[in-house]
Image (cartoon, grey):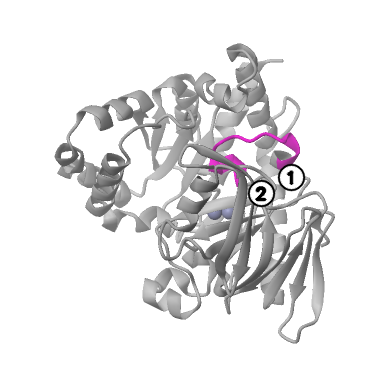
Amino acid sequence: MNKEYLYEKLADLAVRKGVNIQKDQPLVINANIRDAAFTKMCVRKAYEAGAKSVTVNWLDQELSRMNYEYQSVETLQDIPDWIHERGKTEHENGAAYLRIISDKPGAMKGVDPEKMNAYQQAYYRKNADLQAYTMNNIGQWCIFGVPSEEWAAVVFPDKDVREAYDCLEQAIFDVTRVHEDSDPVQEWKEHTESLEHHAEILNEYQFKALHFTSELGTNLTVELVKDHIWAGGGCTTPKGVYFLPNMPTEEIFCMPLKTGVNGIVYASKPLSYQGKVIEDFWFRFENGKVVEFDAKKEKEALQALVEFDEGSCYLGEVALVPYDSPISKSGILFFNTLYDENAACHLALGRPYPENIKGGTEMSEEELKEHGANASMEHEDFMFGTKEMSIDGIREDGTSVPVFRHGNFVF
Ligand code: ZN
Ligand code: ZN
């Protein structure tokens, strides 16, 4: 098999379908230096597609780690003005952003979390006015993954380095629908249309609640906020440019009513949280709140999540992913949310997405709360979808409509 050819296809997909770079538009790529070869392919593809300029910011996890280890908290918090200036100029020029990831899971393990928080909060504060550009989809942005040996070693710990890399590489080609004889740009067009079709149907229904049952014992009712919006697939900028913020993406997602979750949910996959892997766990909800939980492994980590802040024991997201989606079929735990959250139906404890309620992106946090939304600093997805998952949509009058049978959409 000609690997070079597959990587060309992958780069093409990232640039043309992911960010959908426009003629005379600047592109900014943030990439790990280990991914230089793939990044350069993306640069060339972007120029060929008519990009005005392509700027690459090289990142390196080991350098980041050394900064945390050796710099004082004061130095870490001192974000230079030019960082903000740079972002501002990029936005004024209408830039698009491509983030290429291949990170080693747990690379920051053992780094003082206070230092990391101090830097991240300072960075966020310094650039607070710049967040809306990507958060509200003013310019296109895309997060895209490529394999690395460091990452593969964590995903396939029992294999030798070369073999592990080959397995992760194949998995990434598969889940991004890149094969020798496939047309991934066309396949992604059809796939996102199917996601948007499902979202539209559910938006029409405006169900009061969804009722989930599974062979693991899940029996959970999740009420949705009024005027909710099921989102998924791609986004469109105010200039009308369609792009895919996450590649791959398999989910459609919505906003639960903070106080409207009742019953028990059994996780169907392990959860990687703060460098720990939590296994075989469940939550019991009453009026939205986690009132009981247990895990066969790393229960303390689960407790840390539930007790993280006031809102981390309530849900912020409910997402539907068919059991026969490619990531689900791969059966691989990637230890990276970009992939893992697309493997099965999931729920997230913590912060909701404002786009999931009508007018939500213009609402203050207070207004969102008044509409029944949760609020939290945390947003942690966990998978509970299974092969035999059933979902029923409950209407206002109490009647129900089948949504999922045997792990997949009925429509
Ligand atoms: Zn999600
Ligand atoms: Zn999520």
Residue 183 in sight here = yes
Q: Eyeballing the image, is 141 above or below 66?
A: below
Residue in view at x 41 percent, y 53 percent: 134
Q: Which mark is residue 250?
A: 2
Nearer to the camera, 253 or 215? 215
The amino acid at mark 2 is: Glu
- Classed neighbour count for the residue bearing mark 2: other residues with Cα under 10 Å, few (<14), some (14–19), many (≥20): many
Q: Position of residue 109 (x, y in %)?
A: 40, 32
Residue in view at x 46 percent, y 32 percent: 106
Nearer to the camera, 14 or 309? 309
Q: Quadrant of residue 71?
A: top left
- Is residue 236 magenta-colored? no
Q: Quadrant of residue 160?
A: top right
Residue in view at x 32 percent, y 50 percent: 91
Q: Secondary structure at mark 1?
A: loop
Residue 15 in sight here = no
The amino acid at mark 1 is: Ser
Q: Which mark is residue 141?
A: none
Task: Write the start and end of the magenta stretch as one range.
Answer: 328-341
Proximity of marks 2 and 1: CB atoms separated by less than 8 Å: yes
Quadrant holding the N terminus: top right
Q: In the current view of this chain or complex, which residue is farthest to the bottom? A: 397
Marks 2 and 1, the one that precedes in the sequence: 2
Ligand 1 placement by image quarter: bottom right
Left or right, 376 with reference to 330: left
Q: Eyeballing the image, is 192 above or below 50?
A: below
- Classed neighbour count for the residue bearing mark 1: other residues with Cα under 10 Å, few (<14), some (14–19), many (≥20): some
Disc 2: residue Cβ within 8 A of ligand 1's nearest atom? no
Q: Eyeballing the image, is 136 above or below 228?
A: above
Residue beneath label 1, please? 325
Q: Position of residue 283 (x, y in %)?
A: 62, 59
